[in-house]
Amino acid sequence: MGVSEAIRQELIQYILLQVYNDQYIDRLEEKKILEACVKKGVTVEEGLALIHQVANEKDLVVERVVEERAKELLQQFALNDGVIDKKEFEDAFSLFKLACKGKVPDPLLKKRLKQMVLENGWKVKEGGLFGSKWFSTIPS
């Protein structure tokens, strides 16, 4: 990084301040951190690298990262047989919940996963002879 150690330490403290209560960096906090970085003359790329470094060292959750992992898993499920079934969705939900360390309520996690499915046009398997409308019942 082309950043002085003093500025780097100041930004690390700012990151830690943002996550003081919940150990979770949501998208809004991430943007605020990046804005602080830019004001200090640090590029967005360097700021993102610093966020990820601090998150790894301090075991913090970065919302964007866990959402990308969940999205990749759903994508893999969709590519396997063309549809995401209830078990696959629940597997992605479990991974997402574990990665978020309980910082996001279950209904919101399911809503975000459903949004990912809809935004990417992936098909889901629900209904059938004994099936339920499990996907349709998740609020959008």
Image: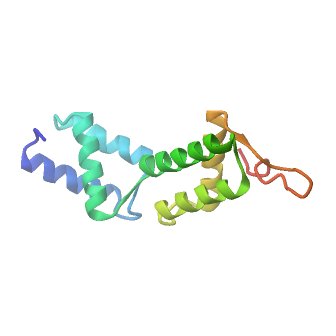
Q: Nearer the viewer, residue 92 or 28?
A: 92
Residue at x-position 46% and y-position 52%? 66
- Identify the image quadrant of the N terminus: top left
User: In the image, residue 87 lies at what x, y percent?
Assistant: 69, 58
Residue at x-position 47% and y-position 60%? 99
- Horizontally, is 137 left or right of 55 in the view? right
Q: Nearer the viewer, residue 125 or 117?
A: 125
Question: Would you place residue 130 above or below residue 82 in this image?
Answer: below
Residue at x-position 11% and y-position 41%? 3
Q: Quadrant of residue 55?
A: bottom left
User: In the image, residue 104 lies at what x, y percent?
Assistant: 54, 59
Residue at x-position 86% and y-position 56%? 131
User: In the image, residue 22 lies at what x, y percent?
Assistant: 41, 64
- Horizontally, is 52 left or right of 91 in the view? left
Question: Would you place residue 69 above or below residue 31 in this image?
Answer: below
- Identify the image quadrant of the C terminus: top right
Question: Would you place residue 117 above or below residue 106 in this image?
Answer: above
Q: How is the image coloured?
A: rainbow
Q: Quadrant of residue 59?
A: bottom left
User: In the image, residue 75 lies at what x, y percent?
Assistant: 57, 42
- Horizontally, is 89 left or right of 14 in the view? right
